Image (tube, rainbow, N blue to C red):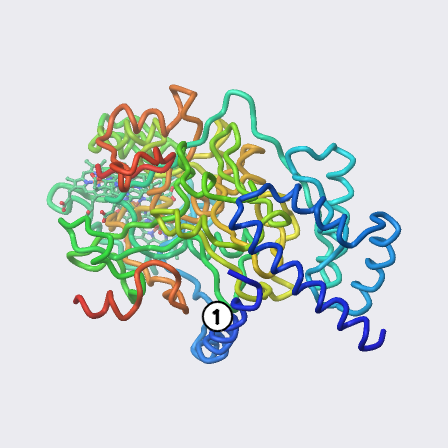
Amino acid sequence: MTLATMEKPIMLVLLLGVMTSLSWAEPMAVKGAIRPLVKEAECLGCHSKTSSITKKKGHRDLSSKHFPKSGTCSSCHLPGQVTKLRLLTGEPISYPQSPILCGQCHGLVKRDWDHGIHGKKMGSWTKSGEPLLCVQCHDPHTPKFPLMKALPAPRQPQLGIKKEESYGQH
Amino acid sequence: MDNTDKEKINQWSERVSQRVDKILDQSVERRGFLKGLLGTVGGAAAASTAAGAIASEVLPESDFSWEKFFQEHYKVMTAEDKEKVFARIETETKRKYGVDVKVRDPQALDGVKFAYGLNLSKCNGSRMCVYACMKENNQSRDPQIQYIKVIEMDIGTLNLEKGDMYYEGESVPKAGKYYLPVQCHQCDNPPCAKVCPVEATWKEKDGIVVIDYDWCIGCRYCMAACPYEARRFNFSAPKVPKEEVNPDQGYLSNRMRPKGVVEKCHFCLHRTREGKNPACMEACPTGARKFGNILDPKSEVSMILKTKRVFVLKEELNTIPSFFYYFD
């Protein structure tokens, strides 16, 4: 391979680049990335600390699709105390402790999560990595992990499987 | 500068390319080649500074620099040599991209050997990793270079050739499909490093296979040798918009590459050697990507190796990848 013989592929790639850049769109913001956690203050606008709902207008539709047969809101939310969750034993826990709540019924997943195998840790691969809570990936009320939009396909045939080939075989 | 100077440079580069061909045929070390060249050109130091001035005036946009050409192999450079090289790269990057960057060279950590696990039951094919990698590692936007390719496969099959890496999807994962991301496997027995005629690519003690872009001559033997097609070639100078340049740069990782060199995934060594997650893993929405120290029995990758059924791609080639896959 000489420097001179490299010129042709360069031209080709430049040409391809010009042609394909027309169809290039910036990556879109993707649905299904990390969910925000509950901020207690947001609840207290309508709920008082000691239960009674002070405003009429409620939530987005939150009929829990999570184990609908037996579950009601108060299977997980401490009745009368909007800033607390409850375990099946009735014991109150705070929002950041919610993985314990989930672990009552999803023991194996919770064990994997404890070891960093299910879910993920942010920031660092060392012990100082911060695990995401279950509810940052799963909406506790409709827990199925959401479908997402895929970011755009590669724009140019890269070495490897050629576009024509892979389409041809379908 | 007038045309005769330009011509001189042209003649010179012609000569270099002929020499490179010869060298490749003989498979001689590049340093020997440099000595030979010094003999031909004659009058080393003085000539090189004068010529340096020519080069920078005549070829303001070129990747060529005499300092770079006479640079020692990275592994034998002293700390001061390296500092000079980093400063040169910072200046060049400022000139070409108009951005102030910092080039560093984080060293492999003691007692750390990196491994990467990918959970194929979780990966949803969103390509978040692909674009996070592109940003972190200053990959050329046009022509486009991406280190990670995600292959869409039919559930129940494992024939990479039948997969589609050009799928689009409004809602992934699609029914009946699974997604298999491939990037450099940082093999313990790396065929790419073995075939490099100038030792521009080698394996570090934490397992990462690195490339010295100043040393790479662009022969692309390594690309042919890699069974995972993990290496990419810069056919032209990489284009990255100024405001998208990541200024935190590693010499052996994400610093700006010149035209005509090979690049690939390096486990984000400028991040991971300082304890951070690789960019692809940080961006993964599903938690399918697991990275860590295989020498630590309590690390996630060690736990996965113990508790899940894992496999590597093309095991029969005995490349011994540090990148494995599993289903749960």
Which residue is more in the foreground, B117 or B233?
B233
Structural crowding at the residue carrying mark 1, measured as other residues with C-alpha within 10 Å and reported as few (<14), some (14–19) or many (≥20): few
Query: Is residue A78 visible to us here?
Result: no
Up-down relation of residue A139 to residue B209 (above or below):
below
Q: Badge 1 is on which residue?
A: A9
Up-down relation of residue B322 to residue A153 (above or below):
above
| Secondary structure category for the residue under label 1 | helix
Furthest-left residue in view? Answer: A69
Q: Looking at the image, which residue is at 71% across and 57% down?
A: B93
Up-down relation of residue B197 to residue B272 (above or below):
below
Query: Is residue B217 visible to us here?
Result: yes
Q: Position of residue B318 (x, y in %)?
A: 31, 34
Task: Indicate the chain on which mark 1 is placed.
Answer: A
Q: Looking at the image, which residue is at 62% across and 47% down?
A: B215
Q: Position of residue B99 (x, y in %)?
A: 71, 59
Which residue is more in the foreground, A8 or B309?
A8
Which residue is more in the foreground, B118 or A82?
B118
Three-letter code, disc 1? Pro
Which residue is more in the foreground, B28 or B328?
B28
Horizontal side of B23 relative to B130 (left or right) equals right
Q: Position of residue A132 (x, y in %)?
A: 40, 39
Q: Position of residue B105 (x, y in %)?
A: 65, 38
Residue B162: name its quadrant.
Answer: bottom left
Quadrant containing the C terminus of chain A in the rendered view: bottom left
Horizontal side of B4 relative to A148 (left or right) equals right
